[in-house]
Image: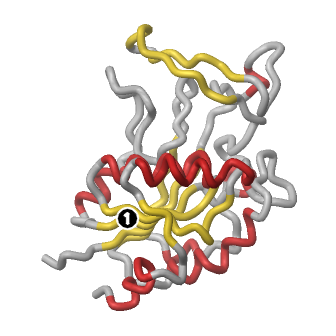
Amino acid sequence: MPDFRPALIVVDIQEDFCPPNGSLAVAGGRDIIPLINKLLASPFVTKIATKDWHPRDHVSFAANHQGKAPFTDFVTIVNPYNESETYESRLWPVHCVQGTLGAELIPELHASQLDMILEKGTDPRVEMYSPFYDPFTAPRVCDSGLMKALREKHVTDVYVVGLAADYCVKNAAIDAAKEGFKTYLVEECTKAVDATAWPECKKSIEASGAKVVSVEGPEVRRLMTAQ
């Protein structure tokens, strides 16, 4: 088996995360699409997109918590199967609701190049930034099937792009590295919600074992020689 079997994970390139009309638009979110499309044309063994696919009563929506505001307020999320396991999570505007235009992949993305589209955040009780699984461990509540898809393709290296750099893309990279993949976040192919905090965020990503790399770097150039 070849020792380099790369996969591309394209995280949440959806209308609600992109200007001009997204309810949770990331500044410059549409600007990264040409580079992502170039990567989609590269010889990955599998190319997988993820989508936030929330029910209207999702726990992450500030509108579902009386007196709470998006961006500034937080909520304690409790494991529905183990009340001793909790975490604090930021509240957001309503976004990527199942079946709405805001939840759709943006039309500029070359979706025909994708092998699979996975939906995440479908359980109203749990926030799920990672495209792999929710933060709970005892027990885990949600699993998207992404790990199974990568293992079935005998993937060795994972390249992560998409939105947003400091939330779902960050967690995708951290969890891919945790699961033993050589993991690369391609910096020019992502944008952060909080651009000023991105340098510190990069440090936490690299502390996990993932690497933040350039589209011009050797890690990406290597794709051109992949078989």
In the image, 93 versus 173, the foreground residue is 173
Give the residue at the far left of this rendering: 1
Residue 1 position by quadrant:
bottom left
Colouring convention used in this rendered image of the protein: secondary structure
Residue 124 in view here = yes
In the image, 220 versus 131, the foreground residue is 220
Look at 44% across and 8% down and name the residue there: 83
Q: Which residue is mark 1?
A: 158
Q: Residue 75, relative to residue 207: is it above or below? A: above
Q: Is residue 129 left or right of residue 194?
A: left
Look at 74% across and 21% down and name the residue there: 64
Q: Residues within 10 Å of mark 1 (few under 14, many from 20)?
A: many
Q: Residue 113, relative to residue 190: is it above or below? A: below
Q: Is residue 41 left or right of residue 44?
A: right
Amino acid of disc 1: Val
Residue 38 position by quadrant:
bottom right
Give the residue at the far bottom of this rendering: 225
In the image, 107 versus 173, the foreground residue is 173
